[in-house]
Image (spheres, grey):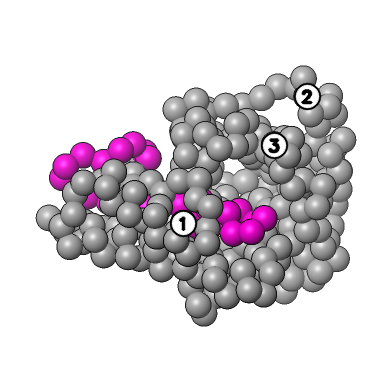
């Protein structure tokens, strides 16, 4: 598997693949890879002839008091894992390569309708950083298809919206969450959890499952159901930011006769912030 750090080198390789009429897939990551990331690469390999994986810890999606400096980085290990999963090329640029004009005053891409709610409320500016770097990667790689994980459900919605609104010529695929045996969604940040916290962490998923059960049993007081889940997490030692029930298609509050819902939650356990979600297909 080839490894490149320069945009020009990546574009030369893409141009060569284009001359061979090969279909290109893209899997953007921030590295510190786990089985969830590798499932995205394998899905992209099923959709494309050549898959580009990226490893870039994007500074513009981190707030001033978040974990950019200590975010886990393991490029050599990531390279080996990506090669084993079938990626044809790893693009691992430096910050100056992606932001030649700096990270403060450069052009930004924003999706206003989705960026100020839920995660956006607690992480101001986060989705502008995500949308900007993803648009850059789409422009650089010129892929026909890109694969993202559904664990970051709101991020996936933001990316789908920007692709639609900017008329970008690629298809976005959302891949299912990969979980440990006890139900905890895989995340690079799980490495921050202490052993005791790791034992307690699956309560987040179990709380979402209990919330889904209440919805399927017929409860429709959305705010009350959310408050019950919030209280359950608090009682289990979490510090929740939110538990929200939303329409799966556009993340708007659901009406009285919903079809496809998603339950989203973010909560801190010790110093680690965990997110998770669970889809609900409501029977008519």
Q: Check if mark 3's residue and mark 2's residue have beta carbons within 8 Å.
A: no
Of tags 1 and 3, the one toward the viewer is 1
Q: Is residue 173 left or right of residue 62?
A: left
The percent coordinates of residue 263 (x first, y second) are 37, 53
Q: Nearer the viewer, mark 2 or mark 1?
A: 1
Query: Disc 2 vs disc 1: Cβ atoms closer than 8 Å?
Result: no
Badge 1: residue crowd in 10 Å (few <14, some 14–19, many ≥20): some
Give the structural element (helix, strand or loop) at label 1. helix
Question: Which residue in the structure is indicated by mark 3?
Answer: 63
- Magenta-colored stretch includes residue 254: yes
226 displayed left or right of 178: left
How far separated are the C-alphas under marks 1 and 3? 24 Å
Q: Secondary structure at mark 2?
A: loop
Range drawn in magenta: 250-276
Q: Earlier in the sequence, mark 1 or mark 3?
A: 3
Crowdedness near tag 2: few (<14), some (14–19) or many (≥20) residues, C-alpha within 10 Å: few
Q: Quadrant of residue 137?
A: top right
* N-term-proximal mark, 2 vs 1: 2
Outermost residue, bottom side: 181
- How far across and down, in percent of the image, does residue 56 sit? 76, 48
Can residue 246 be seen from the camera position used here?
yes
User: Residue at left 54%, top 67%?
Assistant: 201
Residue 234: mark in rendering: 1
| Residue that mark 2 sits on | 104
> Mark 3 packing: few (<14 Cα in 10 Å), some, or many (20+)?
some
Q: Residue at x 61, y 69 (%)?
A: 197
Using the numbered discs, state the Cα–Cα distance from disc 2 to disc 1 in whole angstroms: 37 Å
Measured Cα–Cα span from mark 3 to mark 2: 12 Å
Q: Position of residue 255 (x, y in %)?
A: 21, 39
Q: Return the residue nearer the eye: 169 or 15.
A: 169
């Amino acid at each position: 598997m080839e490894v490149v750090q320069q945009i020009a080198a990546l574009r030369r390789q893409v141009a060569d693949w284009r001359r061979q009429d090969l279909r290109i897939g893209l899997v953007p990551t921030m590295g510190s890879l786990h089985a969830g990331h590798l499932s995205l690469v394998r899905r992209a390999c099923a959709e494309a002839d050549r898959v580009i994986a990226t490893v870039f810890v994007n500074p513009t999606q981190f707030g001033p008091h978040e974990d950019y400096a200590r975010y886990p980085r393991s490029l050599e290990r990531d390279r080996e894992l990506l090669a084993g999963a079938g990626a044809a090329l790893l693009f691992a640029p430096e910050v100056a390569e992606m932001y030649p004009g700096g990270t403060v005053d450069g052009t930004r891409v924003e999706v206003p309708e989705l960026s100020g709610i839920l995660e956006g409320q607690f992480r101001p500016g986060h989705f502008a950083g995500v949308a900007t770097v993803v648009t850059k990667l789409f422009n650089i790689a010129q892929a026909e298809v890109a694969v993202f994980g559904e664990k970051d459900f709101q991020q996936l919605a933001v990316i789908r919206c920007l692709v639609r609104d900017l008329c970008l010529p690629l298809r976005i695929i959302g891949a299912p969450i990969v979980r440990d045996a006890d139900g905890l969604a895989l995340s690079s940040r799980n490495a921050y959890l202490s052993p005791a916290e790791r034992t307690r962490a699956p309560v987040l998923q179990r709380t979402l499952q209990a919330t889904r059960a209440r919805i399927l049993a017929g409860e429709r007081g959305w705010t009350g159901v959310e408050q019950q889940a919030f209280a359950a997490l608090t009682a289990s030692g979490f510090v929740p930011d939110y538990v929200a029930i939303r329409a799966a298609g556009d993340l708007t509050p659901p009406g009285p006769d919903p079809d496809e819902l998603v339950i989203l939650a973010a909560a801190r356990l010790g110093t680690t912030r965990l997110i998770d979600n669970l889809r609900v297909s409501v029977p008519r």
